[in-house]
Image (cartoon, rainbow, N blue to C red):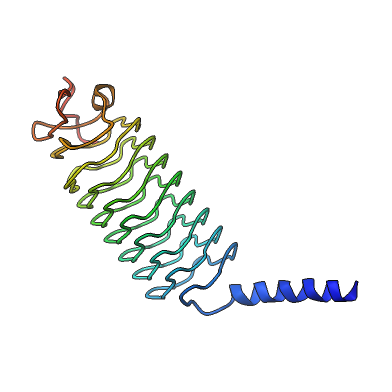
Amino acid sequence: MALVVTAVVSAGNAMADDCRGTPKSGIDWSECTKKNLMLEGSDLQKATLIGTDLTQTSLKNVNLTAANLEKATLVRAWLEGVKADNARFDKIEAYRAVFQHASAQHASFVSAELQRADFTGAQLSGTNFEKAELGRANFEQAVLTGATFSLANLSRADLSGATLGGPVNFDRAFMFLTRIEGLDLSAATGLQQSQVDLTCGDSSTKLPAGLKPPANWPCPSD
């Protein structure tokens, strides 16, 4: 019994030491509290950050390539310039998180909470936002070629000014007042007339064959 207790205590100490450890590639900070920290420029490539609390933490220019942040908390976190290609952000809570000029190509944000998140200028080619909550998210000047928004909530999200150099999947996405002014959506997939009727476009918006601009375009400024 004494040996079992000792092993448990040792394991607990090892976990605590890991939470206090210096940022490094491949580190496991699962379920650790890392709130209100300055981790700018750190190398967290392939790190395991499952359930990690990074509320209001600065992750500017951090290398998160292939890192796993599933169920992490990133509320009001700063991720400007972060390198997060092939990273997993599934089920994160990231209300008002800033991803400006981030590279998260082929990353996964499935079922993520991203209301009012800022993806201005982000590289998001092939990124998966399936079932994500993206109300009022900003994608101005973002590259969205090959991105997936199937079943996502894009209510009042701003896609105007984004680059869509190929097909983007909007299958069953909720697009109430989604701003698509000036977008070339001619190659978009899964887009239905009922979705388009809820959006905000203008005379320069290009729609897939068979769809037409609704009578309410253009919408008033939000």
Residue at left offset 41%, top offset 60%: 87
Q: Quadrant of residue 39?
A: bottom left
Which residue is drawn at the image coordinates 18% and 37% (left, top)? 187
Locate residue 103 relative to residue 141 in the image: left or right. right
Instruction: Depth check: give the residue in front, 175 or 164.
Output: 164
Residue 64 place in picture, x, y as percent? 40, 67
The residue positioned 55% from the left and 69% from the top of the image is 28
Q: Quadrant of the C terminus?
A: top left
**Residue 11: quarter of image:** bottom right
Q: Is residue 34 above or below residue 172?
A: below
Most foreground residue, 73 or 14: 14
Observer-nearest of 43 and 2: 2
For the N terminus, which image quadrant?
bottom right
In the depicted structure, whether residue 147 falls above or below residue 20: above
Outermost residue toward the bottom in this view: 22
Q: Residue at x 27, y 35 (%)?
A: 178
55 left or right of 189 in image: right
Q: Residue 56 placed where, x, y %?
A: 46, 61
Relative side of 135 to 21, left or right = left
